[in-house]
Image (cartoon, coloured by chain):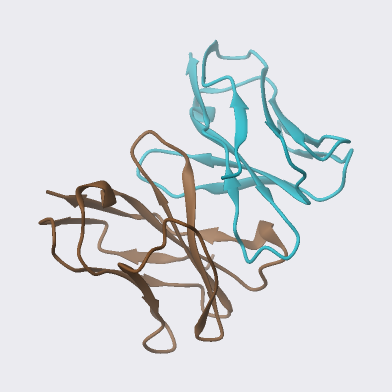
Chain colours: A cyan, B brown
């Protein structure tokens, strides 16, 4: 099946540091999405990207849709303890009926 | 804010038993989905449902799985004869349209444990 390679698998950072994570795919997506999941909860959408090259921000979060349409990155600036969680990238293809392909996640730990 | 609700939050069952997982999607949404997440792994698509029929399904969604919208508010996933490997968190999601993926709202999940 289709795979998204997400890295890093985990990150341990100090509060206030910036964070960067990315996803790559061997195939093209029309939409890239970034979700955050906290324990016992479903994924919550952070940012959605629709065009190659698009750079979108949501507060301290910034994500970009790669120009090849095969990759995306998410940056978190000035991390805080509540940023802790697992971050997933997901890709979506046109004409796909809500079939999101998820990456394996990046587990973020923030030390106060 | 409207949300997708799932019941029960936890379900324990014996191998070979049938289980039904229940979801109430957001009221004006038209498209409904089931995803699952095995412990420590990524979230995986199972099935999408629109206009009382399956519109897309994954390889995971084999003959032991079925979905139903029995009334105007509920959306269910039935596993006919559970196996150990069906143990996972099952997420229901809904959207108003399927081609704007950002409008996919997930519930908090049902943790299914098959013993």
> Which residue occupies 51% across, 33% down?
A104
Task: Give the x, y percent position of residue A27.
Answer: 74, 41
Q: Relative to A78, does residue A64 appear above or below in the rendering?
A: below
User: Can you say which quadrant of the picture contains the N terminus of chain A?
Assistant: top right
Q: Is residue B11 above or below residue A1?
A: below
> Does residue A25 lie above or below B55 as drawn?
above
Q: Residue at x 67, y 72 (%)?
A: B97
Please provide percent x and percent y for residue A38: 44, 38
Which residue is painted at 47% across and 39% down in the image? B42
Image x and y of residue B95, in percent: 60, 69
Count of marks, rendered view: 0
Frontmost residue, A27 versus B37: A27
Residue B109: where, in percent of width, then height?
36, 55
Farthest residue toward the top?
A: A14
**Residue situated furthest bottom in the rendering:** B71
Q: Nearer the viewer, residue B56 or B31?
A: B56
Depicted B29 relative to depicted A33: above or below: below
> Does A101 sit left or right of A52 as displayed?
left
């Amino acid at each position: 099946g289709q795979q998204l390679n997400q890295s890093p698998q985990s990150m341990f950072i100090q509060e206030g540091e910036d964070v960067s994570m990315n996803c790559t795919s061997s195939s093209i997506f029309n939409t890239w999405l970034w979700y955050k999941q906290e324990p016992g909860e479903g994924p919550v959408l952070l940012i959605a990207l629709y065009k190659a090259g698009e750079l979108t921000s949501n507060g301290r979060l910034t994500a970009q849709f790669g120009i090849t349409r095969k990759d995306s990155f998410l940056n978190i600036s000035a991390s805080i303890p509540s940023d802790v969680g697992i971050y997933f990238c997901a890709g979506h293809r046109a004409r796909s009926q809500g079939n999101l392909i998820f990456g394996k996640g990046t587990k973020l730990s923030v030390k106060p | 804010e409207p949300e997708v609700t799932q019941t029960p939050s936890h379900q324990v069952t014996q191998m070979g038993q049938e289980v039904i997982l229940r979801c109430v999607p957001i009221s004006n949404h038209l498209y409904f989905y089931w995803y699952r997440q095995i412990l420590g792994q990524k979230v995986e698509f199972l099935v999408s449902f629109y206009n009382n029929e399956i519109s897309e399904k994954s390889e995971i969604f084999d003959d032991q799985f079925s979905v139903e919208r029995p009334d105007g508010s509920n959306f269910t996933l039935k596993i006919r004869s559970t196996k150990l490997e069906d143990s996972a968190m099952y997420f229901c999601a809904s959207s108003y349209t399927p081609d704007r993926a950002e409008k996919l709202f997930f519930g908090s999940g049902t943790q299914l444990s098959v013993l």
